[in-house]
Amino acid sequence: MSSPDPQVRAARNPSTRPSPDDRPSPSAFRAGGTTPARGPVVAVTGAAGGVGALLTERLAASGEIKQVVAIDERRGDCADAQWHILDVRDPAIAEKLRGADVVVHLALDLDLETDPAARTAYNVRGTQTVLTAAAAAGVHRVVLCTSAMVYGALPENELPLSEDAELRATAEATGVGDLLEIERLARRAPRAHPGLNVTVVRPAVLVGGTDTALTRYFESPRLLVVAGSRPAWQFCHVEDLCSALEYAVLERVDGELAVGCDGWLEQEEVEELTGIRRMELPSAVALGAAARLHRIGLTPSPAGDLAYTMYPWVVSGSRLHDAGWRPKWTNEEVLAELLEEVSGRHTVAGRRLGRKDATAAGAAGATVALLGAAAVVRRARKARRRV
């Protein structure tokens, strides 16, 4: 959604009255008086939905935040924020950031169904624009949110990984290439813009109104386990992510931060807690079938997503812990919430099925989808030739 035409806006808001964007937000004042609250002015991008909306509400209710500036392509529900409606790739965002002390950039598109080229153009260009605009506006800190996926899921990974572990992910999984580029931008920004501090927060498997290849894993009739793999599951509830982001906003911690529940769950524990039986396949079969299904457009998840269900990428979160932060959610509790969220959904090989399709597929659907990949490919090719 684009901003209203300037002439229309002027007609609606005569110069004799301050526009809604210019009036002090109610969050700038606290109950019992008219004195502005102490603390930073914080701008949040992607503030109308998802994690951005939750963080905006949290910061607006905090007595430690002076004011919240909310930026998105549509207006969200938080009445205590000062809203600006624009695309984060618009250089005009620099003017909207003037007066802010901290920017939390959460306007990312990691939707499985988005065209990859369009997703990358939005995510990378948006981050570049926000970092440049923040520096131009005199903002002293930008907080970015990527994912612990940037460490890569590898069989030799330590359990857990420290924040300083090398980022060894590749661009083969959904959105990870974008996240790696954002990480590179974060490291270059302080050199390009002296005086600008950048904090990066990397959550584990994020749960709480999210839809990713990893949350869809638990929508399948069977839990796919690749023979010889060593899965380890660590989750992060969105409430814990928001509290970690608030820590970064208040400068209680900085640098590169990993966030998640304490510890991890082995695959056997996950199966016991979920009550979902495993389906074990040889690596060549699982990876080959996943690649073919994605290549012909039958599934949204590339084969690279499977690595994150095969090998550990658990993080320690030591920097946040040293600063006094602790997660409120356990892995068991987050997994239980995830199961409630996905109840009634049916996914095979990363592809959501309608109710009719799911009934027809039954519990063997995942096996058919993977082991029958070659047949599916042949049928698709024949259909194309007929067309």
Image (cartoon, rainbow, N blue to C red):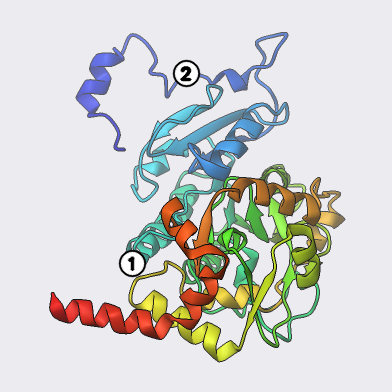
Amino acid type, label 2: Arg
Task: Name the one closer to the observer, 257 or 94.
Answer: 257
Task: Indicate the quadrant where residue 308 lies.
Answer: bottom right
Q: Residues within 10 Å of mark 1 (few under 14, many from 20)?
A: few
Q: Residue at x 61, y 21 (%)?
A: 28
Q: Position of residue 199 (x, y in %)?
A: 64, 56
Q: Position of residue 321 (x, y in %)?
A: 84, 55
Task: Indicate the quadrant where residue 351 lies.
Answer: bottom left
Asked if residue 146 lies left or right of residue 319, the reply is left
Q: Residue furthest left?
A: 387
The residue indicated by pointer 1 is 117
Q: Residue at x 57, y 55 (%)?
A: 144
In the drawing, what numbered circle is on residue 149?
none
Q: Secondary structure at mark 1?
A: helix
In the drawing, what numbered circle is on residue 23?
2
- Asked if one can make out residue 87 in the rendered structure from this viewpoint, the answer is yes
Q: Secondary structure at mark 2?
A: loop
- Give the Cα separation between the discs numbered 2 and 1: 39 Å
- The answer to whether the residue labelled 2 contacts the one labelled 1, judged by CB atoms less than 8 Å apart, is no
Above or below for 88 versus 185: above
Q: Position of residue 177 (x, y in %)?
A: 48, 72
Q: Residue furthest bottom?
A: 284
Amino acid type, label 1: Ala
Above or below for 105 versus 278: above
Task: Name the one closer to the observer, 32 or 208.
Answer: 208
Asked if residue 168 lies left or right of residue 302, the reply is right
* Quarter occupied by the C terminus: bottom left
First reached walking from the N terminus: tag 2 or tag 1? 2
Q: Residue at x 56, y 22 (%)?
A: 80
Q: Residue at x 70, y 54 (%)?
A: 236
